[in-house]
Image: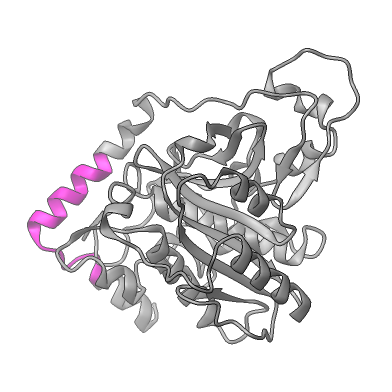
């Protein structure tokens, strides 16, 4: 066992009793989480309307049907179906080794922001390189729930980042999406051998050049009457997804159909992979039944957008979108406490 593993093991053992007890209660609660009713339903299918999916517009296939069942999308939107069933999907996990500095062995009931942001990064990586150029199983492996250098974007790795620790000075603080995205960006960019990098736009658009394929995250507070601009963003060819919330829950949004936002919901507890080497890829890929929807006007205001860029020309295109649609040149992007309450609470 190397020094890093020794430090990790020590950090999970020297925990104040009350914190240890509360975290053990959380672990027990997570085993019961799936019994809580989930009110989010599958989208309604509109056979004659486009599906917007990560910057692509999929037209309906000419077929005479009155169906409104989204499971018939394989018939009505033939080209959209493979895309909809290839998304990387992360949910709560149980029975992993304790997170650094904690006795937490499950994130059931509190880790939705982390899982939504992991989905944002993972699916952005796939879009950045193209599904033909990067193996999905390799990307999933990077996010598996292990404290291991082979899993650099795991929940365990997130718990080692300074920003996650510093945002919890009292042991129990709310984390907005931007904090988790910042932590993931830190994990990506500290690896100098990586094939890509991440950049966060937090104020004005200060990114003027890129050296590698780049994922750009933009935390944003949605103003009133933003629906048409949101459709413009989701239709933008460099768009790679959005994390947002509704009713104090965090989700990964990837598409629009009619007036419905399409998303993946992390609020289900599944056992973590038993091995870092052998795991079922299908357990981390979305099925049609995993896709849920909500009305655009049900979306809460605090979100993070993701975009991918490969060239200076694409950077210019993103700058123009940021200026014309997000008003980023003259709007300082800030995260206010009232915009973030209720998405995430960590106790350690």
Magenta residue check for 155: no
The location of residue 55, given as percent across then percent down, is 72, 53
The location of residue 33, given as percent across then percent down, is 34, 33
Quarter of the rendering containing residue 17: bottom left
The quadrant of the picture occupied by the N terminus is bottom left
Q: Residue furthest right?
A: 62
| In the foreground, 275 or 305 | 305
Magenta residue check for 15: yes
Identify the main secondary structure in magenta. Answer: helix
Quarter of the rendering containing residue 158: bottom left
The quadrant of the picture occupied by the C terminus is bottom left
* 161 lies left or right of 271: left
Whether 94 is drawn above or below 43: the answer is: below
Query: Is residue 274 among the parts visible in the rendering?
Result: no
* 345 lies left or right of 214: left
Which portion, as a residue range, is magenta? 11-28
């Amino acid at each position: 066992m190397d020094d890093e593993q020794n430090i990790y093991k020590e950090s999970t053992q020297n925990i104040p009793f009350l914190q240890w007890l509360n975290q053990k209660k959380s672990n027990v609660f997570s085993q019961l989480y799936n019994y809580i009713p989930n009110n989010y339903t599958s989208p309604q299918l509109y056979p004659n309307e486009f599906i917007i999916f990560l910057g692509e517009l999929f037209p309906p296939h000419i077929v005479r049907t009155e169906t409104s069942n989204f499971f018939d999308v394989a018939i009505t939107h033939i080209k959209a179906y493979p895309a909809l069933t290839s998304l990387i999907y992360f949910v709560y996990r149980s029975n992993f080794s304790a997170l650094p500095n904690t006795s937490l062995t499950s994130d059931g009931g509190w880790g939705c922001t982390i899982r939504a942001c992991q989905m944002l990064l993972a699916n952005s990586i796939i879009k950045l390189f193209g599904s033909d150029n990067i193996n999905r199983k390799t990307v999933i492996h990077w996010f598996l729930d292990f404290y291991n250098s082979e899993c650099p974007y795991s929940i365990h790795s997130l718990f080692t980042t300074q920003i996650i620790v510093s945002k919890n000075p009292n042991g129990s603080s709310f984390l907005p999406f931007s904090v988790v995205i910042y932590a993931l960006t830190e994990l990506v960019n500290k690896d100098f051998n990586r094939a890509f990098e991440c950049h966060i736009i937090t104020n004005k658009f200060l990114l003027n050049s890129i050296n590698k394929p780049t994922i750009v995250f933009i935390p944003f507070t949605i103003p009133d009457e933003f629906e048409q601009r949101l459709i413009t963003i989701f239709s933008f060819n460099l768009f790679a997804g959005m994390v947002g919330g509704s009713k104090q829950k965090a989700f990964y949004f990837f598409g629009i159909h009619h007036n419905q936002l399409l998303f993946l919901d992390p609020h289900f507890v599944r056992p973590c992979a038993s091995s870092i080497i052998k795991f079922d890829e299908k357990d981390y890929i979305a099925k049609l039944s995993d896709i849920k929807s909500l009305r655009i006007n049900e979306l809460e205001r605090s979100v993070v957008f993701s975009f991918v860029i490969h060239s200076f020309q694409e950077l210019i295109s993103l700058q123009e979108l940021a200026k014309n649609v997000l008003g980023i040149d003259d709007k300082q992007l800030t995260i206010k406490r009232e915009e973030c309450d209720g998405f995430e609470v960590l106790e350690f």
